[in-house]
Image (cartoon, helix red, strand yellow):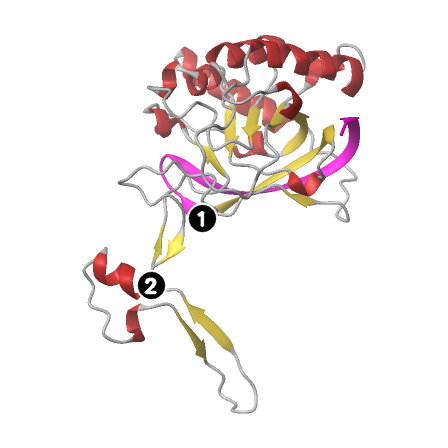
């Protein structure tokens, strides 16, 4: 087994051996996922449908060359009830255009031309949400300085002493704006920031972000940037999260992440994800 396979297997083993948290509250659960139809997440590459949408008549005729003379090939609402006194409505969505990096998703190694798979348990378990909004300025990424501040906060305020070293999953909140659509000024990781994070938290099995990507839009090839740093350590990635359901105040959250895959949004290079967060403790940093 080569070194990369060994690292992937080591992280899978670490995640699998971690006991699932007990006493997770079902009355306090926050959906931290972004819909695949949200244009905020997907890179608007000309050759790629940027976000999921159902084709209408014009799409069918202009994009696919299908002649839609009637409603047969267009999304429509049907009443399939056998009793005229009551409805049973079924909406027939005929065709959905999408790419697998629309909405909240997990990158797979195929995204950067590598082999192997991350383990499902890497995406579910104890997780910390680190709020770094106040540390970022326009056009700045998550670099060494930001990570040093995160580690200091984990040590002084979130954990007790060196407890933070046991952190296995960390999700980064970088923005206040989840509704304005696509922008290429989001806060990615710098390569140095990714290395600094792994140097301080070597037990990580998952890193997540509310940004569309771990890397900057022009970072290429991504295996030479933050994606490659985390992959080299066997760390799985979640992109396109959203944290407005946790309120607007600056805070770190300790809790449990639960990830469920969306099979209709899963392909060879990414897996569509529905992510639920069960907060257990909140450490407020200010407004």
Contact between labelled residues 2 and 1, with CB atoms less than 8 Å apart: no
103 or 14: nearer the viewer: 103
Which residue is labeled 2 in the image?
A: 56
Above/below status of 133 relative to 246: above
Which residue is labeled 1 in the image?
A: 263
Residue 158's image quarter? top right
Q: Dot 1: within a 10 Å radius of its alpha carbon, few (fewer than 14), some, or many (20 or more) residues?
A: few
- In the picture, measured across the screen, residue 172 lies left or right of residue 115, that is right
In the image, residue 31 lies at what x, y percent?
63, 45
233 or 240: nearer the viewer: 240
Q: Main secondary structure of the magenta part?
A: strand
Q: Which of pointers 1 and 2 lies earlier in the amino acid sequence?
A: 2
Question: Which residue appears at 73% of the width and 16% of the height?
Answer: 153
In the image, residue 270 lies at what x, y percent?
41, 36
- Report how many numbered discs are placed on residues in the image: 2
Q: Is residue 268 magenta?
A: yes
In the image, residue 175 lies at what x, y percent?
59, 31
- Secondary structure at numbered mark 1: strand
Could you tell me if residue 202 is visible in this image? no
Quadrant (top left/top right/bottom left/bottom right) for the C terminus: top right
Q: Is residue 62 magenta?
A: no
Could you tell me if residue 147 is visible in this image? yes
Q: Which residues are magenta?
A: 265-287
Quadrant (top left/top right/bottom left/bottom right) for the N terminus: top left
């Amino acid at each position: 087994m080569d070194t990369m396979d060994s690292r992937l297997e080591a992280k899978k083993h670490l995640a699998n051996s971690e006991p699932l948290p007990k006493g997770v509250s079902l009355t306090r659960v926050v959906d931290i996922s972004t819909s695949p139809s949200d244009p905020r997440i997907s890179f608007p590459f000309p050759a790629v449908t940027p976000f999921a949408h159902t084709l209408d008549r014009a799409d069918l005729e202009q994009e696919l060359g299908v002649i839609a003379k009637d409603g047969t090939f267009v999304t429509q609402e049907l009443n399939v009830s056998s009793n005229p006194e009551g409805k049973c409505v079924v909406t027939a969505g005929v065709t959905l255009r999408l790419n697998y990096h629309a909405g909240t998703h997990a990158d797979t190694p195929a995204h950067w031309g590598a082999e192997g798979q991350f383990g499902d348990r890497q995406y579910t378990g104890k997780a910390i949400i680190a709020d770094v909004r106040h540390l970022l300025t326009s056009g700045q990424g998550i670099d060494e300085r930001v990570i040093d501040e995160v580690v200091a906060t984990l040590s002084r305020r979130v954990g007790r002493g060196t407890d933070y070293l046991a952190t296995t999953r960390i999700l980064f909140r970088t923005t206040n704006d989840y509704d304005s659509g696509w922008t290429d000024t989001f806060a990615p990781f710098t390569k140095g920031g990714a290395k600094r994070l792994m140097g301080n938290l070597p037990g990580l099995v998952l890193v997540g972000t509310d940004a569309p990507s771990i890397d900057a839009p022009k970072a290429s090839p991504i295996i030479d940037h933050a994606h490659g740093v985390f992959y080299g350590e066997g760390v799985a990635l979640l992109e396109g999260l959203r944290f407005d359901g946790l309120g607007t105040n600056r805070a770190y959250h300790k809790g449990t992440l639960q990830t469920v895959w969306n099979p209709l949004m899963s392909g060879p290079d990414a897996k569509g994800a529905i992510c639920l967060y069960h907060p257990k403790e909140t450490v407020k940093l200010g407004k």
